Image (cartoon, rainbow, N blue to C red):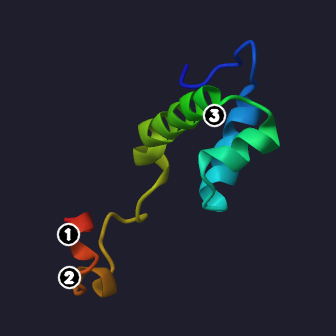
Amino acid sequence: ELLYNAREITIEEQVAMFLITLGHDQRNRPTQYNFQHSRQTISKYFNLVLKAILHIAHEYVGHRDGTTPAQVRGDPRFFPYFK
């Protein structure tokens, strides 16, 4: 099990904190204020959600046919990430 309901925080709240922090380019402090959890709690569950996403990313992220688009392949800014 990648994520779990903890005594102090549910899976839904963990994912919400992660998405809000990432989506709004927030630091830890506003997330602490919004969710009323400590810095350590926010950091712990942000990292757990991130690790869970990285664990399942290979199943859900990628080009359908496995090829790299020509625009990416021909652009030196992007291609090193798609070798």
Q: Residue at x 57, y 37 (%)?
A: 46
> Do the CB atoms of the residues marked 1 and 3 lie less than 8 Å apart?
no
> Do the CB atoms of the residues marked 1 and 2 lie less than 8 Å apart?
yes
Per the image, the residue denoted by label 1 is 80
In percent of width and height, residue 55 lies at: 43, 36
Task: Identify the amino acid type marked 3.
Answer: Ile
Q: Quarter of the image holding residue 17?
A: top right
Task: Give the mark, 1 or 3, whose residue is nearer the N terminus.
Answer: 3
- Secondary structure beneath dot 1 equals helix
- Residue nearest the viewer, comparing 28 with 49: 28
- Residue nearest the viewer, comparing 62 with 53: 53
Q: Quadrant of the C terminus?
A: bottom left
Task: Identify the amino acid type marked 1.
Answer: Pro
Per the image, the residue denoted by label 2 is 76
- Residue nearest the viewer, comparing 19 with 38: 38
Q: Quadrant of the N terminus?
A: top right
| 1 vs 3, front mark | 3
In percent of width and height, residue 43 lies at: 56, 34
In percent of width and height, residue 78 lies at: 28, 76
- Secondary structure beneath dot 2 equals loop
Per the image, the residue denoted by label 3 is 42
The span from disc 1 to disc 3 (Cα, nearest Å) is: 33 Å
The span from disc 2 to disc 3 (Cα, nearest Å) is: 36 Å
Q: Residue at x 50, y 35 (%)?
A: 47
